[in-house]
Image: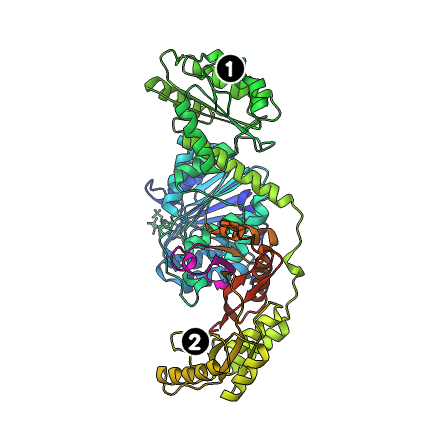
Amino acid sequence: MVNNKPNIKYLFKPRSVAIIGASQSKNKIGYQIVENIKCSKYPGKVYPINPKGGKVLGFKIYKSMREINGNVDLACIAIPAKYTFEAVKTCAEKNVKFLIIITSGFSEIGNIEEERKIVNYAHIHGMQVLGPNIFGIYSSMAPINASFGPSEVISGNVALITQSGAIGVAMFGKTKSENIGLSTVISVGNKSDIDEADLLEYLILHKETKVILMYIEGIKHGDKLVSVLKKTTVKKPVIVIKSGSSKRGALAAASHTGSLAGADEIFSDIMEQCGVLRAESIEEALIWCKFLSNTPTPRGENAIIITNGGGIGVMAADACEKYGVNLYDDINILKKSFSNVVPEFGSLKNPIDLTGPATLSDYENALNIAIKKRDIHSIICLGCETAGFEVEKFPKLIDKIYSKNKSTKPMIFSFLGGIGIEKSISDLRHQGIPIFSDVYSAVSCFGAMYFNYHNLKSQEIIEKNSDEVNIDIKVINDIVKNVLKENRQFLLSHEASAVMKATEMQMPQSYISRNINEAVKYANKIGYPVVMKIVSKDIIHKSDAGGVALDLENENEVLDAYQAIMHNCRRYKPDVKITGVEIAEMIPKGTETIVGARRDKSFGPIVMFGLGGIYVEVMKDVSFRAVPITKREAMSMIKEIKSYPLLLGVRGEGRKDINSIIDTIIRLSKVILECDSISDIEVNPLVVYEENKGVKAVDARILLSKE
Ligand code: COA
């Protein structure tokens, strides 16, 4: 338990730092950290610690922490794991606020106890732990580079949080060659104490940080991360790279909701829900970071392409479609604005094609028109090295236009050509101009920019909250308690129906018959056709046991079905204990969907939606969101499935009742959020009727947690 957490600003701006394990040997990590601290021109007090004493890089080496006069804010520990705990104890004596434990050999190799012992001790003594198993921290605020990463760092406005050591160090190094300025680099390693969410919470209001890049391998407290990410992305863009996309099927397949997607699909969907950009590669992530940290926010959706080649223009238009960039298409305004700079054989439709012979002055004129036009919000400038293209002069023009307008309108450039063009691209990029030889890389930056733009816009829409739905949690908890008393981990169908009733969801009318006469009585009461289903705690998969009969039209069919169900189930499991047979209304046909909610290992409560039948079984066409969920988020998860157009109505059918699906998703999300004992709920099928005609939850499966 943390009862006296130190102020996190001292992690980023410590007044003094001790390096435990500071060595005079150049090949030791304890030496490299002192060297980096020195290179970063850290203005605070530096205390290298080593029992041998002496000097390192001009600093006096203290034989122990006890030799230091006064307190220390930050201690960097780089000694073997078996000595670390003792060193932590000496840090407590000097009122250290943050421990940066570089050392490996803790929970990552199963040494969980030692790691816990250190964290507990640290907390009791008012310290927090970064790591262990990390390469350290860089912070431009201090400035301090207390890491064994690269010593040459460009300070700037990108924050990098990384779980991976090696990749993190490599990315840290690559920022220099890519000319990306950093506000902070934090290696989180085993995340024994401080994790990404804690750091994001601080970075939300960190003036020095404009863009946050995270490299994640695994998530420990996903629910905490989700809530911080949602708050962060409305303030600044967050880009994530996550490895481990092949963990498909690793989740326990207790229900569809659990088995339909691997952890990676859930991760992707939830990141999108949080407004986080997911990059597919480190290169893409760095390109986006650099672009987003230097570009202004667009004032609107309308992008324009200016090109001297039709082909490259079409490629850019394709890329715009792929990355969700909207091309301005008011042909009258385009004609009026650009007809003076486009020859008759060029094109005034967006892409604006200046054609092959276009001169640099044609480019300049066209770009200036686009910059001045209020209805045009962002500019993609393309070029191919044609016969007369002024290769030597074009960098100067790009530099001039970009430097003058970079803070007013987002601009991106892509040029294709020989060695001269490539060299110019490399030089211009080094100057910080967003120019690429690959059109897709260029447009992907606009894709990232507009993803953030849309995220911000959608947050502005005032919406009704999920809290409005009424569900009777007490009734649900009482049902669950009774089931747990019987040592069962699943609800029988009448119990599941009672839970659904408590959530105020529309279920088919149904009764449990204890004998054949009751079966007939209830069928007559409901009216034909009816459905019959076995109710037994020994049978979960009712159809597999022959325990289901559909579409029964009259008394005789009910009598026959009752006997058949009894016979089948007794043959399926000779010692079966049968509670009864459920007689239910056979509901009219509609569009079958699945709505589920479950407790995910990484993210905690999540919800799932998909269309029934082959869409879910074969195509795995489902979407996920973390809970709690708003109506807007529920709508976005419905829209996200590929089969969404079927809900809008095809072949003369009307639009389906999407509002009722949203309502169902929100109700289930509330149950999973508030009833701790429930691990999985799945309504399958949820039959959806046409607009305003509602939905019916035909079958509900509810599983309970083992704990
Ligand atoms: N206080 C101060 N100094 C101490 C000490 C203590 N309690 N105990 C040992 N030292 C000194 C040693 O004498 C040595 O100094 P020297 O070079 O003058 O002899 C120095 O600290 C380092 O100790 P050493 O035993 O030589 O360890 P090392 O440098 O070989 O390894 C680690 C230490 C932390 C680097 C190593 O245990 C480790 O964990 N490596 C992996 C780090 C890593 O990859 N982290 C994750 C990156 S993402």
- In this picture, is 489 found above or below 17? below
Give the labeled residue for mark 1: 364
Residue 386 horizontal/vertical position (percent)? 37, 15
Is 612 one of the magenta-colored residues?
Answer: yes
Region of the chain picked out in magenta, as a range: 595-622
Q: Is residue 570 left or right of residue 192?
A: left
Q: Do the residues under discs 2 and 1 have CB atoms within 8 angstroms?
A: no
Is 516 one of the magenta-colored residues?
Answer: no
Residue 238 horizontal/vertical position (percent)? 51, 43
Mark sitting on residue 540: 2
Q: Looking at this view, is 702 or 548 the one in front?
A: 548
- Mark yes or no: residue 106 visible: no
N-terminal label among 2 and 1: 1
User: How many marks on residues?
Assistant: 2
What's under tag 1, amino acid-wise?
A: Glu
What distance separates the C-alpha of mark 2 from that of mark 1? 71 Å
Q: Residue at x 47, y 84 (%)?
A: 559
